[in-house]
Image: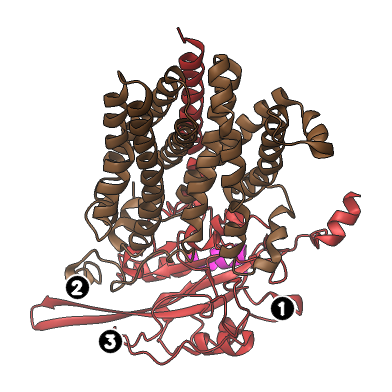
Amino acid sequence: MDAANFPRQGGGDGGYYNYPVVRRPVWTWEVPAYFWLGGMAAGAYVTAALAQNFGSADDRRVAAGGYYVAAAALVPCAPLLIADLGRPDRFYHMLRIFKPLSPMNLGAWTLTALTPIAFARAASHAASTGLLRGPLGTLARLVPTRLAELAGVVLGLTLAGYSGVLLAATNIPLWAKSKLLGGLFMASGLASGSAAVTLQAAWRGAPDGSLHRLAMVESAASAGEMAILTGYLLQSGKTARPLTSGRLRAPFWLGAVGAGTLLPLLVHRMAGRRQGRPLRILSSAAALCTIAGSLALRWTIFEAGKVSSEDQAASFELSSE
Amino acid sequence: MIDGYKRLMNIEKPPTPKTAKGFFTDTSLCIGCKACEVACKQWNQLPADGFAMTGNSYDNTGTLGATTWRHVQFIEQAKANGQGQEQRWLMMSDVCKHCANAACLEACPTGALVRTEYGTVYVQQDICNGCGFCVPACPFGVIDRTPKHGHFEAGTAHKCTLCYDRLKDDMTPACAKSCPTASIQFGDVEELRTRARRRLGELQARGESKARLYGMPEGREAEEVGPLHAFFLLLDEPERYNLPAVPRLPRKTMAQRYGWSAAVGVGFALVGALVFGGRR
């Protein structure tokens, strides 16, 4: 008798009943919220530093508000991360060892290093405009701005880039199948960060030239995000279904793709030849869309990952290529 | 200063390595008695998971989890033959594989997950802060976090310890001790592998052409996660037991993923410098 070749159970994907192969992630809303804010803070800091070092006097003045945005967006980051822990009282164990092999450890160190630098650079700017006076102002003037910008850019890019790699460094099919999730979150973070700089610049009545340049930088990030997202979806194939056709399809297509990349690209293009108030209104609208879309992207990919964790067939596909 | 930091953070010198210990689970001997599940729960004082009927054969456990470290699967198979239907019932006691390259251990940001002197993978409960990263990292869906506000070791990661406490006293892990058919065998990994190869030969000679070992150094499944310290003799394809053909180790593709991320970041910085620098 040949004991082999019993047909697959239930004729389905051939796994053990319909039990998932991997476990469902235990993380809650704090994680995508942190990824969104951290990416935006990093993007704003990098944009501000670029304008500071390569831009005109107007660009420098206008974009320096990005340091305030970065510092403000970083404030809730650590509390969000701590709140998501199973044992928040042991949050400092993250810094118990230095282990860059673990993206989670790398991220914790990066956030710890970037937060004081972003605050110092923001304080230094506040001191230079006379906003921060007294002994604190004197202290803030001592901050080596160039060094803070360089270190902040390196740390900022790490912060914006590691979050997607963290999700991808798992065995959740939707997160792990394509190699582009890190790049996607990086682009989304830079787009939302530069959008936040545009937004505050428009509100403060920035000159047209500076707004046009900021819009160009933001659009470049959005276009890059769209290109990488296309690659991500193509590489993921059927694995991306929880994102593209499940109950998250509306926030994904309308929020992350439509409002997050297409609409801002269109509106910035429309604003391209305008000046003054119409330009400021259009730029602000586009920037708000980019920022909201960035949150939609993190949230939908995060939630769809939980659905994907239950996809037995996708797990087998991931482990057989 | 470094010494003070190490004291504050509970960083100790690891013990001297000993002979690698592990499990050889021979599913051809399993009778589905679940003594391993019960012995594991008793020894490790793990709480019950409730009395839910799954409707999936005799399996009312479902999956491994934070408080279920042994799980007996019941696979019912049937095929038509000349006289009617031929049936067989595959049983398998699943457990943490204690991978040579463990995804959970590599993911752990606190160093709570360690490799013990016996070559096994162990969660230090006083270090784990419940970040949850090991949970989706494991390609086998083994490790899990207990509920944050539960009664049992709330909010930290849990999985099979290979009875680390018993090993320390030269005792056999509870599941292997309780197994009445020697389906679960405990011992030195090297010796278990020799035994497994011999047993596979016996079964193949009897016509079990689909019998195979899962987790041996020469297997495809060891490509990324390395040989498993808890390995199996299976009677059908790994997928039938919900085991991935080639379990993935996230580290293997991490550089490529960071590479794409860095490329986008550098590209953005260049565009930014050009746009701000190229002003009229």
Position of B118 with respect to A264 (left or right) is right
Front residue of A164/B275: it is B275
Q: Residue A190: which numbered mark, if any?
A: none
Residue under numbered circle 3: B55
Q: CA distance from mark 3 to mark 2?
A: 14 Å
Is A247 in the magenta? no
Residue under numbered circle 1: B165
Q: CA distance from mark 3 to mark 1?
A: 36 Å
Residue B157 in picture, x, y percent from top left: 59, 69
- Per the image, label 3 sits on a secondary structure element best described as loop
Q: The disc labelled 3 sits on which kind of residue?
A: Gly
Residue B109 in picture, x, y percent from top left: 64, 55
Residue under numbered circle 2: A10
**Chain that appears brown:** A
| Residue depicted at 28% across the width and 59% down the height | A313
Q: Would you say residue B123 is visible in this rendering?
A: no
**Residue range of the region highlighted in magenta in the rendering:** B188-196
Residue B158 in picture, x, y percent from top left: 58, 72
Same chain, labels 3 and 1: yes
* Image vertical order of residue A255 relative to residue B73, above or below: above
Drawing shade for chain B: red
